[in-house]
Amino acid sequence: MNEELFEQLEFVENPLFETIIENLLQQQYSVVNDFFVSEEVEFLRNSLLAKYDADRFKKSAIGNRTNEEIDKTIRGDFILWMDEKNANEAELLFFKKINELVNYLNKTCFLGILQKEFHYAVYPTGTFYKRHLDTFQNDDRRKLSIVCYLNEDNWKRENGGELTIYTEKDEVNILPLPGRVVIFESQLLEHEVKVVKASERLSITGWLKTR
Ligand code: OGA
Ligand code: MN
């Protein structure tokens, strides 16, 4: 085999992804600051806002797409499913990075992630998502949940909207800071989105799934 080809096939360790894996193994969740740099966040935020302004979002439901029900006492966000096949430039960048992570997880952890689904989400002031698990009675394929925050740089604690993850031992409160990505075990960790007290809370949420 010639040297060049060998180099391409060689496995290259990725320190960031290794940290994520280590966190998941130890505590079932991982919080990564600056998974997306601020230009990328702005690019994605603009993509989200353009679609939101064009009125393409709909009221979120509970349950999955075949078994859904709108209940504002459980969640109050507005969502738009992303379509990788018709992705704009910002979304291509998003999926490129996510796919790198998926390929890495599949190679190193044999997770068997074959599908993914992502949606934009907007939580207007006053909305929340009550404590829940990301799996459905008629679908247990969701393995990892991924939340990417697209808020402005000046997002403040007083705005509320923390993600609270309930571990066996305690509650972990995570601010939805721009560029931050939270990854957790969909079937194991209950979590909630606390009331947004000011501003709009912007994010992309998705799931890595087995068949
Ligand atoms: C969800 C969810 C968490 C967040 O959409 O299922 O729990 O921080 N989102 O937005
Ligand atoms: Mn959830």
Image: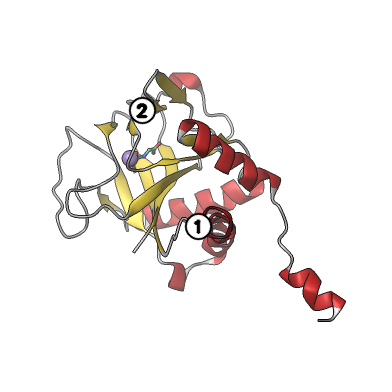
Q: Nearer the viewer, mark 1 or mark 2?
A: 1
Task: Specify the quadrant that holds the C terminus.
Answer: bottom left
Residue 24 rendering spot, x and y as whole percentages: 50, 38
- In the rendered structure, find residue 23 and report the number of the disc placed on it: none
Residue 152 visible in image: no
The kind of residue on which mark 1 rests is: Phe
- Give the vertical position of 84 relative to 106 (above or below): below
- Relative placement, left or right, of 152 versus 9 is left
Q: Secondary structure at mark 2?
A: loop
- Distance Cα–Cα, label 1 vs label 2: 37 Å
Q: Which residue is mark 1?
A: 110
Residue under the point 79% across and 73% down: 6
- Between 117 and 2, the residue placed more toward the observer is 2
Q: Secondary structure at mark 1?
A: loop
- Give the vertical position of 36 relative to 75 (above or below): below
Residue sitting at the far front: 1
- Relative placement, left or right, of 164 versus 70 is right
User: Which quadrant does ligand 2 occupy?
Assistant: top left
Q: Earlier in the sequence, mark 1 or mark 2?
A: 1
Residue 92 visible in image: yes
Q: Which residue is mark 2?
A: 196
Residue under the point 74% across and 66% down: 10
The kind of residue on which mark 2 rests is: Val
Residue 126 rendering spot, x and y as whole percentages: 29, 28
Label 1 packing within 10 angstroms: few (<14), some (14-19), many (20+): few
Residue 25 rendering spot, x and y as whole percentages: 51, 37
Label 2 packing within 10 angstroms: few (<14), some (14-19), many (20+): many
